[in-house]
Each structure stands twice: as C-alpha cells, then as structure tokens.
Amino acid sequence: MATLTLQAISQLIGAKFSGVDAPFTGVAIDSRRIKKGELFIALKGQQVDGHLFIRQAEALGAAGFLVSQPIDTKLAVIELENTLQGLAQIARVYRQQFTIPIIAVTGSSGKTTVKEMLSSILKKVYKIHVTQGNYNNEIGLPLTLLGLQTTHECAVIEMGARRLTDIQYLMDIAHPTLSLITNVSTAHLEIFGSTENIAIAKGEIYKYLSPQGTAIINKDEAYVSYWKSLLTTQDIITFGMTNQADISVANFRLEATQSCFTVITPLSRAEINLPVAGLHNIKNALAAIAVAYALKIDLSIIKEGLESFQGVQSRLECKPGINGATIIDDTYNANPDSVKAALQVLQNRKGKKIFIMGDMLELGAESIKAHQDIGLYATNLSIDALYTYGILAKEAVSTFGKHAKHFTEKYDLIAAITCELEANTTVLVKGSRGMHLEEVVAELLA
C-alpha cells in the first residue's frame, strides 16, 4: 500500500482527527476479518451499524477508525458525518498516488468475463490489480482501489450501476485512464425503465472520462453516436463484429468447447482459439483486445493471453455430471440476451440438450413477454427439453410446447432431471442470481 498516515488522510479529506497517528496497511469494513494495522471503517447499513463493533476491531489490531460519531479509544480516529462518503474520499485520495493505467469496465453483461479476459492478457506484461468478485459498487470499488500496492503496474476495475449517476459517482473515485462499455441490453429494465436509460447510465463511464483518457466503444451497439457525443478530446478505439471497427473479425467458427476467429487490428491480424464457447465470448474477446491494443500490447501476447484464458466461475462453466452427463453452470445471473447466448452454446453440443431455466429478474413490465420469448427461442433452436423453476420462468413452458415442465420446488426438479442424465446429454442451468440455481447444479454433479 502507498505510504499515508491516518492523520494525513484525515487532513486530505477534511475530517476531524484525534488520537495517536499511525500508518495503516489497508482498510476493512468487517470487524471479524480485520488485520493488524488496518483502518476499520464503521459503515451504517440498514441492518448493521459498524460502530457496534469498534471494540472487536480494536482487539484484533486495528490501527484506527473512521467513524461518524465520537468513540472512546486511544487509537487514531477520523470522524466525519458520513462514513460511506468517507470511504469514497479516502479511496479517491489514495488512487491519486498512482499513475498507472486504470481500466474501467461496465455493461449490461460480459463485464466480469471481459475483466478476466483482460487479466489473462495483461498479466503477461504487467503486475496487475483486478476487481474481485462483484466488488463493483459504491462500497466494493473503493475497497478495490484501496487494495492497490506500489508494485502494481495496471488495474482493471469493474463498475456496476443500479440507477442514473451511479457510474458518475464511481468515476469520480476511480479516475480511470481507459473506459469500456461491453454492451447494453434489458438487464435491470425494471430499475431503469428503458434500454435508452441504461445506455445513458452506462454512458457516464465516457462522459466523466479524463480528457486525456481513451474510450473503448462497441461499434455494434445502437448507442454509439450518443456515446461519442459525450467525448471531447479523448482517444477512441472501436471494436465490433458487424460494423466496421478498429478491432474486427474476418471469420469465426463456433465449437462445443471453444470459439475460433481471426482478429484484425490496424497493425496486424491473428488466428485465436478461445477456450470458451459462444459468439458472445468472441465479442467479449474483441473488447479485451481493443483495450490491450490501446495499451500497445503486441498481438502475439494478446493471442497468448486469450488462449490461456481459464473462463469464469458459473459462466458457461462445463462440469461433469451424474452418469456421464455434462452440466453447463451459467447460474451467475441472467437477462434475455445472456440466456439466448447460453442457449446458442447449448445448441452446439452433440446429443440430448436440456435447459433448466430460472426467473430472469428485474425486467419490469417486460417480464412475462421476455420469458415467453425465451421458451420460443429455445424450441426454435431444437432444444430437447425445458425444465423451469420460478413464477416467471413458468411463462416459457407454454411457448416451448411439448417436453416442457414447470416445478415449484427445487428438489422435485432435481429428482426429475436426475432420471434424464446419461452420457451424451448436456444440461444448461441458467437463471438470475436471486434464484440460487447453483443449488441445482451442485446436486447434478458427479
């Protein structure tokens, strides 16, 4: 961690300081996991108030505390009205200690996959720091930035949005040097109201990009002109499969477990055998290539990085199932576009193909139609059987037709599908995170 003392931090963010000054080795918001020398930040949530755990953090070796009310301790205390804003301010100040490339990634889907593809490329060249898990919100992003070490040479930061101005808030903390939107789809439509509003919300990653920064733009998206209008002096690098772009594809071949394509950049071209399936993953790879190209990484290294990509947990992850079946675990999350992409991967498998579908949440007024459309889409791809779980997923049964069945209990679904598992059978399991379909996957594994 870059060297700053707690008193210096308090001065930089304009907070009240008391107690004995000390350097700190990091920050923590969970008193149970605090490490010796860390700053404990007492966040006030809807259910838990971090101030109630000051003594526990002190006993475990905290260097000091960020609080919004007076506390009794001899250790360093930084006090200000809102500790969540304090976390953001500290992260912003801390980030300014670094001059390394910082890449911000957002989008309706593919954020994490692109982040991990980028990591696979960038670690060939840099010592990198990457967002872990879903640390992409107003708490997770500052914690990610505060994990930067002086040895890091590059960082990839994921940004999520639940409302307008969320990305703006995160951009003000992170000040990235490169910004990327993977795509815009109907994810979180219930919250944003329209895909246009989603494009506006995601577009904040370009609107608040430094004038000296670089914008990476998906040329196949409908909002390219709008996003470009948000930029002034920034460099722009585009990628796409359909429309002419700086980073493009000459041809591609989709296989059951990999995707092969020729990438073309302004400098050269290369054949890439991406070890994950699906057309959408070629698009994700193009996004990662565009960022790497912006960082002037040689295409041979980009190829090496992508071809060593290990995939992402619970994103189209193939696992051995009971009786020799294959289970495709895609339970991390779901929206109409990502479900269709997963079904295309299932279609490319040999043998019997079964789809276990859970609800796609947060689609608002479009929910019923969206689920009905998926049922029709699956039957048009000649998927052999559909098993659904969830009130909304039931809507897909009628449009799928024969060999579709709905379940109100997971254990009934598991019992029914287990009887169908045999060699040369592939089962795709997908639904929104709130449906917890990972519980179904766990019961189907060999």
Image (spheres, rainbow, N blue to C red):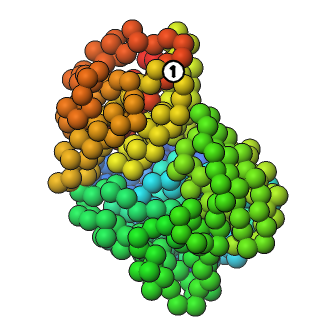
* Quarter occupied by residue 419: top left
Residue 218 appears in the picture as rendered: no
- Is 440 on the left-hand or right-hand side of 408? right
Residue 281 appears in the picture as rendered: yes
Rendering coords of residue 384 (x, y %): 38, 24
Which one is in front, 59 or 2? 2
Report the residue at 73% width, 50% height from top. 272
- Is 327 on the left-hand or right-hand side of 198? right
In the picture, which quadrant includes the N terminus? bottom right
In the picture, which quadrant includes the C terminus? top right
Q: Is residue 27 above or below residue 199?
A: above
Q: Is residue 305 above or below residue 101?
A: above
Query: Hey, what amino acid is under mark 1?
Result: Gly
Report the residue at 51% width, 38% height from top. 345
Q: Is residue 428 above or below residue 371?
A: above
Circle 1: element type? loop
Rendering coords of residue 288 (x, y %): 63, 60
* Residue occupied by mark 1: 351
Rendering coords of residue 257 (x, y %): 62, 34
Report the residue at 79% width, 51% height from top. 304
Report the residue at 40% width, 36% height from top. 381
* Quarter occupied by residue 126: bottom right
Which one is in front, 79 or 2? 2
